[in-house]
Image (cartoon, rainbow, N blue to C red):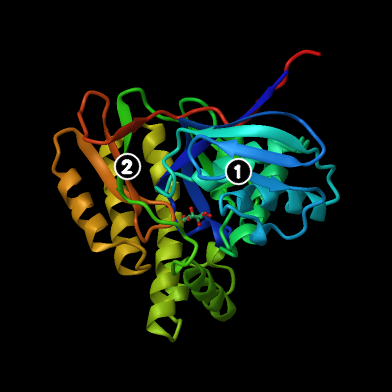
Amino acid sequence: MSSVARAPGRVNLIGDHTDYTGGLVFPMAIDRDTTITFSRSSDVTLTSGNFNGEVRFSLPMRDAASVRPEWGRYVAGVAAAMLERSMPVSGFTGHVATEVPIGGGLSSSAALEVAAALAFGIEADAATIAAVCRRAEHLATDVPCGIMDQLTSVAGVKDHALLIDCHSLDVTPIRIPESLAVWVVEISTRTLDGSEYPTRVAQCATAEREVGPLRLADVHSVSAISDATIRARARHVVTENERVREFAAALQVGDAREAGRLMYASHRSLSADFETSTTTMDAAVETYSRLPGVHGVRMTGGGFGGCIVVLADDDAHVEGMRVRAADGASLDTPLS
Ligand code: GLA
């Protein structure tokens, strides 16, 4: 009898490039899942309807980066990260299928990691599962990602976005008004592997050596940073944290206009100060902003391609993929 591990992708409404400095983010898990249907075995064998090739490795797993085909690194990374924490890792033979567009900025890799953790039999609270899966991504690809994607995939709440403090890991679900809809438009596929993402993480660390934790800094304190590029990166982070707070407050009172204004400001900051947008994404934000019923548009996720997110009236039509806020990961095990 097979079990099914299910983990959703995510879209971030606002708060990008803030998680790895312990800042604020405001994502939601989406109604697009990755599932692993599996039965227990001593090692790991995984086929896929969406990815090429078959992944096979034995346990214990210590060298995730060398596993091929490449998508298997994320699965192996989870086994390796669980081993680092001395968690028991159970093998499986399974099949993975996903509805999350791959490399589209909707956290297809986090969804795969979280589904794999459940299939390996992880038993821990949401923050620990997310931390293991974040570590898996580091082991698999060397991309020093934050915790937003994995924590959202684990802790998602239907009909709610999540206000996450990435320092305390407090998750506060905030209901998305029924009068509003969230759309995602894929601009280009890409992976953060090989992108400038690690450079941005390093630039924020440089800023923190000069002014202390960015999550505690304000616009005034970062204006003293001597290097213009580092100063701009830090300015994005502190203003973005503030926008997340204001966005959550706006959504709670149903002020779509203010929420939209903050999304545009976030996009401009990511484009000008953080330089993670592209000319195609900037143009798409501009185009979609003119559609009737649209309140706000911005790039979402790591950037350098990926997708834009659109906040619109429920009855507005947007050319793209409508997503609904969904519950986080789950495991269905047959009664034995
Ligand atoms: C990627 C990373 C996240 C986060 C975003 C940017 O999705 O995996 O940890 O840093 O980029 O907000």
Q: Ligand 1: does it lie within 8 Å of the C-beta at label 2?
A: no
Rendered view: 33 above or below 236: above
Residue at the spot of label 2: 259
Q: Is residue 30 above or below residue 335?
A: below
Residue at image x 74%, y 35%? 92
Q: In the picture provided, is 139 more to the left or to the right than 263?
A: right
Q: Is label 1 or label 2 in front?
A: 1
* Residue situated in front as seen by the camera: 201 or 278: 278
Q: Classify mark 1: residues with Cα within 10 Å, few (<14), some (14-19) or many (20+).
A: some
Please, which residue is most extreme toward the bottom here?
Answer: 226
Q: In the current view of this chain or complex, which residue is farthest to the top?
A: 335
| Secondary element at image label 1 | loop
x, y (%) of residue 263? 31, 49
Q: Is residue 297 left or right of residue 86?
A: left
Contact (CB < 8 A) between labels 1 and 2? no
Q: Is residue 125 left or right of residue 96?
A: right
* Local secondary structure at mark 2: helix
Question: Of residues 9 and 160, which is closer to you in this image?
Answer: 9
Identify which amino acid the numbered label 1 is placed on: Glu
Give the amino acid at mark 2.
Answer: Ala
Question: Looking at the rendering, in which quadrant would you find the N terminus?
Answer: top right
Residue 298 on image: x %, y %: 30, 50
Precedes in sequence: disc 1 or disc 2: 1
Note whether residue 282 is visible. Answer: yes
- Write down the residue under mark 1: 54
Q: Quadrant of residue 296?
A: top left
Identify the residue shown where x is 58% and y is 68%: 213
Residue neighbourhood size for the residue with mark 2, other residues' Cα within 10 Å, grouped as few (<14), some (14–19), many (≥20) = many
Q: Where is residue 143 shown, x and y percent of the image? A: 56, 63
Residue at the front extreme of this rendering = 53
Say which residue appears at 34% left-offset and 48% top-offset. 307
